[in-house]
Image (spheres, helix red, strand yellow):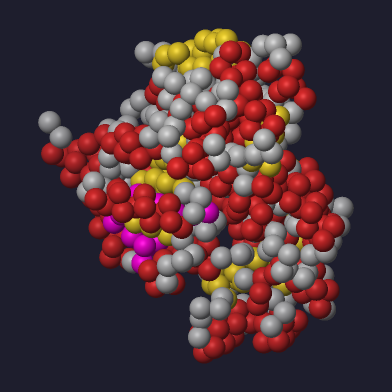
Amino acid sequence: MPTAQDILKQYFGYDSFRPGQDKLVQSILSGRDTLGIMPTGAGKSICYQVPALLLPGLTLVISPLISLMKDQVGALNEAGVPAACVNSAMSAESMRDVLGYAAQGGYKLLYVAPERLTAPAFLSFAQRVPVSMVTVDEAHCISQWGQDFRPSYLKILDFLAALPARPLVSAFTATATEAVRDDIVRALGLRDPFALTTGFDRPNLYFAVERPPSKPNALLRLLATRTGKSGIVYCATRKTVDDVCDMLLAKGLPATRYHAGLSAEERQRNQEDFLYDVKPIMVATNAFGMGIDKSNVSFVIHYNMPKNMESYYQEAGRAGRDGEPADCILLYSGQDVHTAEFLIGHSHEAGDSSVDPETRQALIERDRDRLRQMTFYATTDECLRRYILRYFGEQAPVSCGHCGNCDTVFEQVDATVDAQKILSCVYRMAERGLHFGRGMAAAVLVGSQSEQIKKFRLDTLSTYGIMRGTSMARVRQLTDALIERGCLKADPDRYNALFLTASGNALMRGRDTFVLRLPREKKPETKATHRRAVLLEADVDESLFERLRTLRAALAQKAHVPPYVIFSNATLADMAARQPITEFELLTVRGVGEAKARRYGDAFLDAIKDYLRDKP
């Protein structure tokens, strides 16, 4: 009888489990319901795939997206694991064939969308086939208090109740606060579950926040230093996606786009261009990414700030899944907050009859609080990694030495006088019964002569033009800081109109000071640079690595699979370092299992032998 360790080596090519994986695997094999909270890239799928190969019957994996299922099944098949999926994109004949073969014991894992669970044909199949385990992937989707609630996940409990015998249940997710974890346990009816949070830290990820005067210029600068790298640029709206992608294409960059407004055919084509590295830059809304298992994403740039930390960390975590150093950069502006507030309002529209008004209001308040936490992250001068880990309930050192803030020297600036001018402007407008957003306030302060200013006679205010010579961007930055400190309130129900608070009134009247910490300069040689150097294998032969990448691309094209499905960049790097010339030596390379060694081993061994023979 093979052990979990044997299965891990035989099919997946790893000699040992990552931290936490072994405990979760052993819990499942002991017959106990299991909940695993693991950051993206930590290897959640291994935790249920290895037990599935050891359990006697079929494992059903409930997964939210077709692309996720296809990726997982494709990778398993490449590794020699009999797996398939059932989804709405399949014809009735194909679905019958898959279920028929599964009923004969042909598969060990069968992936299924939650919507199909209670369909008569599938339910009939599940009631007559021995199901050893039901695994719920992206389990946070079952919680109404999670960041990506999907009502279809509520069918899972009814499905389990309809089976002749309740199977073992396991659930996995990447981002879940304590409240969401408790909700997952309740909503799935987990019985005395073994629950493990392996830790949210991803040491190979470098976090940074920039507040550039021009986001387009900042993005082009960042991409110019990442030529040939694969990455994702996230935008808040479809229009921004289109605008940013068009800009990148006009500059000759290999970019493509993804959002819900495109046809299904175009989304599929663009996604494949990204996965196959035809167009390594993907510009997308948050509709893209869940289940995208592309391992060689080396950067994720958020062009707009997401609505909450859960979404941000999940999206940023799509970088560096192969363990290689990767960058997660947020381009922040105060306008991002207003966009996010607008999206929050529209995501809880009163037309949804499944949510009562009281719950709807509670969800809106929850989302607004999460947005505040996300804004604090974007504007803090403390260690970014520490902020993220503390948000998810994990202790962290004061400084990680590996984020944008830890690499930045800050200086204190007394901005009390400018802050008082802004607060006074809001106060003077309010005296006339007028409330505007930060853009209009900034226009008054710098002495703009726009039509709106004249229409409302704002040029007659005593604060009109008292900040001439200061840029609009600077005034808006200070206004954002006043909002973040609670001196001003932007009312999302009134187009983010500004209102003076009690603390703002005290500051305006000279009873407080307003000191900011602003970045002064970058250190010439950062700790992050040193950390990245440590993460890289010192003895990787870069020329051989590039030759192996070229070979992988050719084999991937022939097999009609994305390159990373054959071998990840981390595996190629280990191969270039070890330089195996026999199959036995090849199997010592991390990530090379028996099936892949049989299928691709000769080609890679020949390439290494040719390289060593030609090498001077």
When asked about the image quadrant of residue 500, the answer is: top right
Can you say which quadrant of the picture contains the N terminus?
A: bottom right
Q: Which residues are magenta?
A: 269-286
**As drawn, is 217 to the left or to the right of 426?**
left
Residue found farthest to the bottom: 93
- What's the residue at 40%, 61% (across, down)? 271
Pick the residue in front: 372 or 460: 460
Pick the residue in front: 22 or 513: 513
- What's the residue at 58%, 13% (across, down)? 417
Give residue 346's position: percent from left, percent from top.
Answer: 64, 58
Give residue 394's position: percent from left, percent from top.
Answer: 71, 31
- What's the residue at 44%, 72% (across, down)? 264
Pick the residue in front: 178 or 431: 431
When asked about the image quadrant of residue 370, the answer is: top right
When asked about the image quadrant of residue 102, the answer is: bottom right
Pick the residue in front: 166 or 358: 358
**As drawn, is 107 to the left or to the right of 122?**
left
Task: Confirm whether residue 596 shows in the render.
Answer: no
Can you say which quadrant of the picture contains the C terminus?
A: top left
Does residue 270 show up magenta in the picture?
Answer: yes
Taking 59 as reference, is 170 above or below it? above
- What's the residue at 74%, 51% (across, down)? 364
Does residue 207 show up magenta in the picture?
Answer: no
Give residue 220's position: percent from left, percent from top.
Answer: 31, 38
Task: Confirm whether residue 433 shows in the render.
Answer: yes
Give residue 380's position: percent from left, percent from top.
Answer: 59, 25
Marker count (numbered): 0
